[in-house]
Image (cartoon, helix red, strand yellow):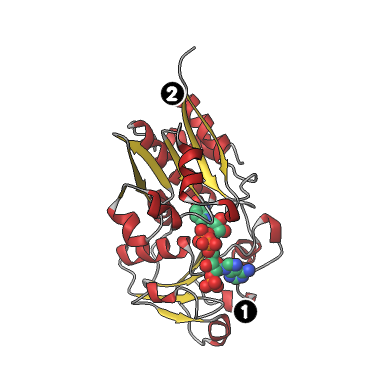
Amino acid sequence: MAMYKKYGLLGANIAYSFSPDLHNRMFQLAGIKAEYSLIDIPRNQFDLDVLSKAVESFSGFNVTIPYKETIIGFLDEVDEMARKIGAVNTVVLEDGKWKGYNTDYDGFLYLFKQLEMLQKKSATILGTGGAAKMVYHALMDLGFEDISVVSRSLDSDTEFFKKARCMDYIALENRMQSSNLLVNCTPLGMSSQIDAMPVSKKQLEFYEAVIDLIYNPPETKLMHEASRLGIKVLGGLDMLVDQALEAESIWTGIEMNTEKNRMILLGMFR
Ligand code: NAP
C-alpha cells in the first residue's frame, strides 16, 4: 500500500475543528496521498519533548490556540513575517528542519480585498492575542496609520502594538469618534457563547465596515447587528479557507489557492 504523508492540527481541546474536513478534502482534490488528523495536547501536558514525539511521523502541521506563539521555541527556522508577528500557524518539515509560517496573515489579506474602499484607513482591533497581532501587521502593511487596540486589561501584551492607541472597553464605549473599520479578534460570539457581542450596538453605529475573524457560527451576533445597520460585514470563514489553502501550497509545493478550490471548500460550509 502506498505511504500516506501525515499532516495535522496542533492545539488543545480542538475536537470542534473544521481543519481535518478541509485538508482531507484538499488532499483528495489534488490527488495527494496524505491524511490530516488532530494533535490535541492539553496545556498542562505540553512541553517540547511531548510535542517532538507527537509530530515525529508528520510532514507538516497547523497550529492553533494556545500554541501559536509557544511553537516558535520548537522550530529550526521561522519565516520573516511569522517572526515579526510573533505567531506561527503552519509548520513544514523541509530537509529535516521544522520551518514555521503565518498563513493567517495571507488569509486576512485575501479577506480584506473583499472590502470596498474605506473612506479613511483607520481601524479598531479588539483583543491582543495572536490573531490581533497578525491583523495589526496586516493593516500596517495595507497602509493603515491610525490603529486602536482594545484590551480587557492594559496589563495584557499591549507593548507589542507600538504605534497603536491602546485602550480598554470602557474607553472604547466612551469614545466620541471612531475608526472606519472594526476587527474582532476575540472569541466573543463563537458557537460556545453565541449571544455575546464584544461591543455595544451603540458603538457599532460608527463603523463603515466590520470584520469578525470568528468562523463558527458563519454569522456572529456582531455581524448580524452590523448588517442590520447597513454596515459592510465580513466573517472569518473565507479567511479560514484561504489560510488553509496557503498552508497546503507550502506543504505540497502545488499552487492550491485557486478560485475553484476556494469555491469547493467554501461550499462545504454553506
Ligand atoms: P487568543 O490568542 O486566545 O487571543 C484572544 C484575545 O481576545 C485575548 O488575547 C484577549 O485579549 C481577548 N479575549 C479573550 N477572551 C475574551 C473575552 N471573554 N472577552 C473579551 N476579550 C477576550 O486567540 P487568537 O488566536 O488571537 O484568536 C482570536 C479569535 O480569532 C478566535 O475567535 C479565533 O477563532 C479567531 N481566528 C480565526 C481565524 C480564521 O481563519 N478565521 C484565524 C485565527 C484566529 P485581552 O486579554 O487583551 O482582552
| Outermost residue toward the top in this view | 1
- Quarter of the image that includes the C terminus: top right
Residue under the point 56% across and 87% down: 174
- The amino acid sitting under disc 2 is Ile
Q: Is residue 68 above or below residue 52?
A: below
Q: Which residue is mark 2?
A: 32
Outermost residue toward the front in this view = 49
Residue at position x 60%, y 51% in the image: 42
Q: Residue at x 38, y 63 (%)?
A: 117
Q: Relative to the observer, which residue lies in front, 52 or 229?
A: 52
**Mark on residue 202?**
1
Crowding at label 1, few (<14), some or many (≥20) Cα neighbours within 10 Å? few
- For the point 63% across and 59% down, the residue is 220
Q: Position of residue 192 (x, y in %)?
A: 70, 57
Specify the quadrant of the image occupied by residue 259.
top left
Specify the amino acid type for callout 1. Lys
**Mark 2 vs 1: CB contact within 8 A:** no
Work out how far the residue at label 2 is from the one at label 1, CA to CA, in angstroms: 50 Å
263 and 81: which one is in front? 81
Q: Left or right of 163: which side holds 259?
A: right
Q: Is residue 44 visible?
A: yes
* Crowd class of label 2 (few under 14; some 14 to 19; many from 20; radius 10 Å): few
Please state the horizontal and vertical placement of residue 261, each as a whole percent of the image: 45, 34
Within the displayed image, which quadrant is ligand 1 positioned in? bottom right
Image position of 24 with respect to 146: above or below: above
Residue 124's mark?
none
